[in-house]
Image (cartoon, rainbow, N blue to C red):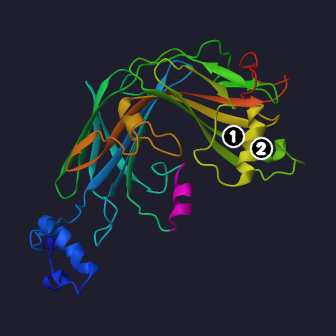
Amino acid sequence: MTDSPKVARGHPQACRPNAGLAMMVVLALAPVLGGCALTEVTVTESEDVVIAEAQLTINQHGDGGTSLGVYAYLHRTLSGERPDEVQGAIVRVSGASAVVHLEAADSGGVCLAPWEDEEEEENPEPDVGSCYLTSVAPSPFSPGEVLELEVVLPEGGTLTGVSQVPGAFEFIGLTHENGHCRIEPDTNYRFHWSEAAGTWSYISDTWIEGLPEALAGRDIEVPDSLYLTGFAIGAKDTDILFPGEYGLFDLGEQADADLLRILDDGLPGGARGEVAFAATDRNWVNWARGGNFNPSGIIRIPSVFGDGTGFFGTATQRTLNVMAAPDGPGMPPLCGPADAPAR
């Protein structure tokens, strides 16, 4: 049960100036204030609603197969006396010929990674919501299909959202073996791919590992692994330089900036990275915000409506494993000719 609306009332004693300048101010304001008769102003209570942040990805594999990954992170706008968790919800995604149900999972897992460390640093006790997810192979949905998200809340409310999955895409000029390829040490490689129908942005991210060994002996602090992101804005922007055009959302320690300058010239020998390329829909782009990447402006644009708010974004994705190493026995094929370092 919510409290009654709060009412702010004018106090008559506030209209009694002592003398001099105060009297002049009151006389000047008299026509505006209408004799100091203040109008009652009602301050409404903020509404506690559920926010549903849902992402669905159709993974395209090199052998022609597909798999589906879906998650929904449910949390509330206000903490108050109610828990942030939204347990007991029914979450499902429907297409033309299939319905996929999401199951409750650990809130600190897929739904928050890889942003949970950044959030915990800014807020030692972050609000924790509820995570629902599922994975299916092969995918029951297809690129280009229109899908609907439905969330039935435990108290009876319903949230819905609709998205058209971006179309499929293929790499151009890439050589790989079972999703693995290599680049020469300290070089960049420019990935090219075909246009994905209906996409609003291509997002590529990578986990780079092996940097401490690759940069041993240099006077620089190097993490065990590094998460970087690259963006290609617009459906026709279909190439990106790896790793020269990838970066952090927010540069923290100076070591991060020093390390990025090294990566501008290419991936050091011995380092390796799993690189994902995702063609994302309008809903995804309009909700995504981080660092200087704010395609929706200051305010996120929702695509989930009903008894709450949020977004339902979809994507098609391809993943590669890239290592920096010279040719030799057991090495995967060269991804392709090296590209000049980013400047």
Q: Amino acid at mark 1?
A: Ile
Residue designated by label 1: 208
Q: Left or right: 11 with respect to 181?
A: left
Residue 115 coordinates in the image, percent (x, y): 52, 51
Query: Is 119 located above or below residue 146 in the figure?
Result: below
Horizontally, is 178 left or right of 279 in the view?
right
Q: Which mark is residue 248?
A: none
Secondary structure that dominates the magenta span: helix
Secondary structure found at label 1? strand
* Foreground of the two, 219 or 114: 219
Where is residue 339 drawn, in percent x and y? 74, 20
Using the image, determine if residue 108 lies above or below residue 236: below
Q: Which residues are magenta?
A: 114-124
Quarter of the image with the N terminus in it:
bottom left
The residue that label 2 is drawn on is 211
Tell me, yes or no, whether the two marked residues, 1 and 2, touch with CB atoms within 8 Å: yes
* Identity, as a three-letter code, of the amino acid under mark 2: Leu
